[in-house]
Image: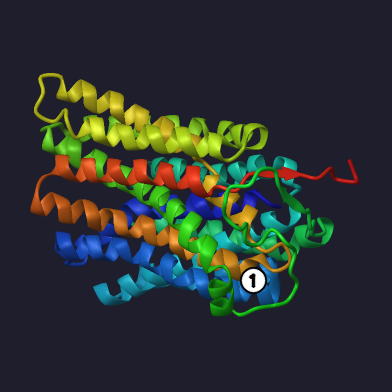
Amino acid sequence: MVYLPTILFALGEGAVIPLIPVIAANMGADVAAAALVAAALVVGQLCGNLPAGWAVARIGERFTMVIAGGISMIAVVGMILAPVIAVFAASVFLLGFCAAAFGLARHAFMTTRVPLHFRARALSLLGGSFRLGIFIGPFITAGLLQVFDEHAAIWFFLACLAVMVVLVLFGPDPERTNPPIHADLVPAEDSGEAVSGSIPTFERDGIFRTMWRHRGVLGRLGVAAASLSAVRSARQVVLPLWGVSLGLDAQTIALVVGVSGAIDFALFYASGQVMDRFGRLWAAMPAMVLMGAGFLVLSLTHDGDAAVLWFGMLAAVLGVGNGLSSGLLLTLGADVAPTGEPAAFLGSWRTLTDAGGAAAPLIVSGVTALVSLSAASAAVGVIGLLGALGFIRWIPRFSPRRDPRD
């Protein structure tokens, strides 16, 4: 009841995402317009985090997920029946908006109900559930396209949403079977910064008051987390463009990107193990250094004799780095969120991290247009290394008090 609805939602979304620009192009959009329609999903998710935080704080995780699932079904039907490209784009935006509500509801549930000593593993499994759907979804789309038309994957998403809503609405309610756990967190060593949200607070604040109250942690640790999101997002853009710039065919590029994604997916639980056993920094640092250094080295290999070999090797390195950071953003957000009412804070946190992910393609595009793709790769590498320094400085060091029920 915790992970299955997430898998269902991510599975349908993963099946639809590759088809969004294709359907937009078939409706008459040029390449730039099709890319803009595809970006509407990310923009919708970015805009949906703050309202989702408000909804979860007032009506709870379960009903937020049910409402988001119902509105998502309307958005999917709109994608199928859209008569013009504007309606299709609006439906994609609405889908992203609902995806934010669904993701935040699950994040808030895990934050308040998972004991600290295995929080990172639980949230890494949550992140792995999203990755499983996004990883398998395109293969389902490929199979459906062999038999049906391009809208078959959207119908598949609609079926996943229907099952998910029924499961959440009529299945056992995890909110009742798992009461909130307000575990006290005690700083094990002084990092020089106040740890926002570590003292339980049960006063219900609004979204903007919460943002202002926790502006310190959002402006420091939140910015470092946004840099991780940016590097992750840049990987999905730079690798295919790098393959194209080397003159590789689509099949080879897909193979390299697919292997990188498989390595990423294989490591999602290892990340949680590292964070729970050794601390959050021991997952954040290797991940950011590997990805930052990987992008920097990649920027130096484009014109070399072994450029294709370096491309494959460094794509694997980036996959390892991304896999080691699985669940990190979820875990850090849970660590610094107020224990009484985390939803409003998590809405601000996820807005900040999603903004980093949304900005990365724009940075890559702009630097590539002004200088070169190699310079864009180097810029992403610098962002990654600066983010690593931010994590060193601002990740709080926690030691959990013993749970009296253990």
Q: Which residue is pictured at 41% across the width and 51% down the height?
A: 229
Q: Position of residue 386 (x, y in %)?
A: 36, 45
Residue 207 in the image: above or below residue 104: below
Q: Position of residue 38 (x, y in %)?
A: 30, 61
Q: Position of residue 11 (x, y in %)?
A: 50, 49
Count of numbered circles on the image: 1
Q: Quadrant of the C terminus?
A: top right
- The residue labelled by disc 1 is 56
Q: Which residue is pictured at 77% across the width and 61% down the height?
A: 175
Identity of the residue furthest to the right in this view: 405
Q: Does the rendering let one see residue 228? A: yes
10 Å neighbourhood of mark 1: few (<14), some, or many (≥20)? Answer: many
Q: Does the rendering let one see residue 99? A: no
Q: How is the image coloured?
A: rainbow
Kind of residue sitting beneath label 1: Val
Quarter of the view holding residue 338: bottom right
In the displayed structure, does residue 90 sit left or right of residue 185? Answer: left
